[in-house]
Image: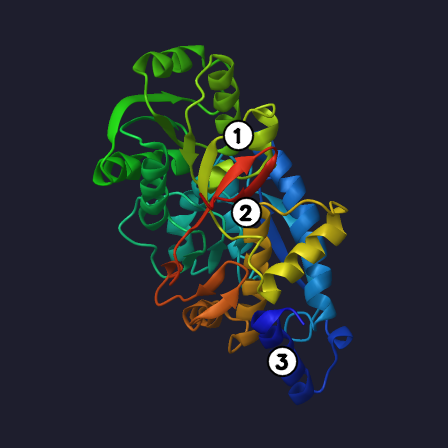
Amino acid sequence: MFSKLLLAISAVVLVFASTTGFAADDKKPLRLPFAYVFSGPAADYGTRTWNQVAVPGMKFINERGGIRGRKLEFYKVDTRHPETAPWITDFRRLAANKDIPIIFPVGTTKSTLAIFDLTGELKMPTFSPASSGRWPLPSFGDWMFRMMPQIDTSSPPLLKKAKAAFGLKRVALVHTDDDDMSVGNYRALRKIIPAVGLDIGIEQTFKNEDKNLSAQVAAIKAADVDAIVVSLQAWSAGTLALQLRERGVNVPIIGDPGLIPPEYWELSKGKGNNTYMYAYWSPHDQRPVVQDWIKLWRETTGKNDKFPDSFITAYFDGLLVVAHVLNNAKDLSRESVRQAFLNIKELETISGFITWNKAGDVERPTSPVLVHWKDGAVVPWTQ
């Protein structure tokens, strides 16, 4: 069995079916949109998430009773990142369908922010488990939920460890100015870096689609910094890492979970060593919920010597939370689903124990997991 989370899902389904007198096959499937990016520069993320999370996740949950005795069926809805206008229109369309109790998984912080006002206006529970950008608004309202470790609590321990390990004094700070996650975390880092006793020697910025970063790399090299702190998506960070290493800039690169997907290593052309991040989870955590997820992912992908990355793991973990919420809600009304999120207290998940006392970011009692790239693999940073 797959941990307390899946025990809870299975138990609720069995009780629900026995008290209502039907089996899963006696009810029509529960069809939900899988709202994620399936086009544009991040389309590979969408393909990977659909194949490694949505498809095996449906089978996994349905084998354990589904959702309230009904089979779960996902269908694709493209959030079209980095565009927002079409996604806003689609969100309105989805919210108009009263048979849809939740919108999941949304994806990037940019896509999440784009529909934030509508979640309250249309009273639609929205769960964006892998949105990792610092929230720029005064609150999350009542209907938005997120699950990633956040920069204000996770980056300081990472930077403090890097400072001690490498004797850091001056760092470069790099971000893209057309990405909400990057901009939000950059603004946080401008305060966090001095707070941990480091100087920002130079700042550089560029746009997500930029491929030639020679000017930024030259400026960083001339600044003679001890490390480079980045707030970037994987594809931008990989491009930067390659060009830095080609110009002989070999100081540590320090970032967040955006540097963990394999696209970072691929775009760096194998030059991503000496890169350090905080992560969503540790594959070396021996809890059954973690090891069973690794086993399932390896069976799905055939990559028996690899581990799933943080984003794929966050989406699968999020899917388990969605199943828990829908099976434990009083009913499938949107208010009941919202309340079921708020009823989660110290629930065991792949990423640890989580609690929601209010809408927005989950609360976690544990310190962040620190990792680094080593020869094509993300491994625990134990130094």
- Mark before the other along the chain sequence, 1 or 3: 3
Query: Going by the image, does 160 lie left or right of 311?
Result: left
Colour pattern? rainbow
Mark pair 2, 3: CA separation = 28 Å
The residue at which mark 3 appears reads as: 11
In the structure shown, which secondary structural element does the residue marked by tag 1 occupy? loop
Query: Going by the image, does 378 lie left or right of 303?
Result: left
- Label tally: 3
Note whether 47 is above or below 337 in the view shown.
above
* Three-letter code, disc 1: Asn
Mark pair 1, 3: CA separation = 45 Å
Query: Which residue is painted at 56% across and 69% down in the image?
Result: 324
Say the numbered circle drawn on residue 273: 1
Label 1: few (<14), some or many (≥20) within 10 Å?
Answer: many
- Mark before the other along the chain sequence, 2 or 1: 1
Note whether 232 is above or below 216 in the view shown.
below
* CB contact under 8 Å: marks 1 and 3: no
Q: Quadrant of residue 119?
A: bottom left
Which-is-in-front pick, marks 2 and 1? 1
The residue at which mark 2 appears reads as: 310
Image position, residue 108 (x, y; %)? 48, 42
Q: Do we see residue 274 in this rendering?
A: yes
* Three-letter code, disc 3: Ala
- Mark before the other along the chain sequence, 2 or 3: 3
Mark pair 2, 1: CA separation = 18 Å
Image position, residue 55 (x, y; %)? 71, 53
